[in-house]
Image: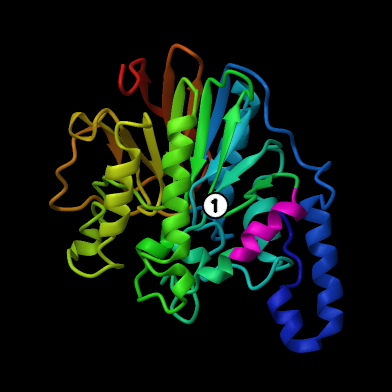
Amino acid sequence: MPVRGISRRAMLAGVGGVGTAVALGAVGRQAVAAESGTGKFPIPDKRELNVLLTGDAGTGKPEQYAVAAAARKLCEERGVDLAIGLGDNIYENGPEDVLDDEFATKFEEPNQGIDVPWLMVLGNHDTSGVIPGSGGRPSRGDHEVAYHHHSARWYMPDRHYSVAVPRQAPVAEFFALDTTPLSSYVLQTDPEYYWNGPFAQKQRAWLAESLAASKARWKFVFAHHPLRNNGTHGNAGAYEGITCGDYLSGKHVKKLYEEVVCGKAEFILSGHDHTLQILDTGADYRGTQQIVCGAAAKSKGRAADAQNKAFWEAYDTLGFMMLSIDADRVVTDAYTVDPESGAYTHAYRHVRRDRVGG
């Protein structure tokens, strides 16, 4: 495991300006500053893709490093073109600023060698205030958006965005969302991020227009919170077993997915639950399939009352997935990881050939 630098948080608290200088050096060494935009790893321009899928990774603990090392080995063997990080990138409360050393210790260092664009989204732990994981301070996510200009790997130009590959006649398009303001554990206090506030309205309109305009063969919507989930957080609209209120239940996440995404995209990719799930192709959801991949640093069990049909599920294990995409099919390979040895095991393969509306 890499040697950790002095904590920016500790230094700023203890020695003021000297701490800032130390932190700038740490981030500079790990992140490949790219203010001009020329230092970022390029979005691939090809019609066959391998996409690494991880979620809930950012603990900085040995389990994260074990999964990242296993993923790096697989990427060396199979090749990789993109990676997707499904939120909770910086536990427990998100970064304090764009130069927080936790970007180095919880993202850059573990992922060294996986030198491709990492398409990132925000999770509830990235946007928290006093209460860890509450999602009650969305403005903290601005630091992760700003970090886009300080890292070769980290790709988050906005809180929601899309990436089409290749640009002309894309085989795949990836649509990133920020679902935390719609499903926080506390009431939002900033009117910008109310469940029906300007941000939510703008994001919904953008997503509807972007999906309708997309010419991609395969469409992937990815966000931290799932629509369907057999893990302990439960399904959107009944997160944590709560069905009332505008936030904790996730009912507005459910509405966004069901009204805008279902029948328009083949896949919803999510984390939040620290599990690995490849659910069915969603006949009740107009062909939109849910994949949950949130076991990159933690594991957690299955809900006792889980009712979603699944092709494959794994609980109480670490792991990640790889998507292999071409014009004819999307192959989802799931891998489990032994945290002691760092060895990965291929656990399941799912092949999809049908598209929504087809």
Q: Residue furthest top?
A: 328
Q: Is residue 109 visible?
A: no
Residue 313, quarter of picture:
top left
**Above or below 201: residue 210:** above
For the residue carrying disc 1, how many other residues have a C-alpha within 10 Å: few (<14), some (14-19), or many (20+)?
A: many
The image position of residue 122, as x and y in percent, is: 51, 57
The image position of residue 158, as x and y in percent, is: 60, 53
Name the foreground residue: 210 vs 185. 210
The image position of residue 274, as x and y in percent, is: 38, 52
**Above or below 356: residue 184:** below
Residue placed under numbered mark 1 in the picture:
64
Asked if residue 235 lies left or right of residue 206, the reply is left
- Residue range in magenta is 142-151
The image position of residue 159, as x and y in percent, is: 55, 55
Q: Which residue is drawn at 66% across and 39% down?
A: 117
Asked if residue 196 lies left or right of residue 246, the reply is right
Tag 1: residue type?
Gln
Asked if residue 291 lies left or right of residue 66, the reply is left
Name the foreground residue: 79 vs 179. 179
SS type, badge 1: helix
Query: Magenta: predominant secondary structure element?
Result: helix
**Above or below 314: residue 80:** above
Q: Can residue 189 be seen in this view?
A: yes
Name the foreground residue: 313 vs 33. 33
Asked if residue 24 lies left or right of residue 48, the reply is right
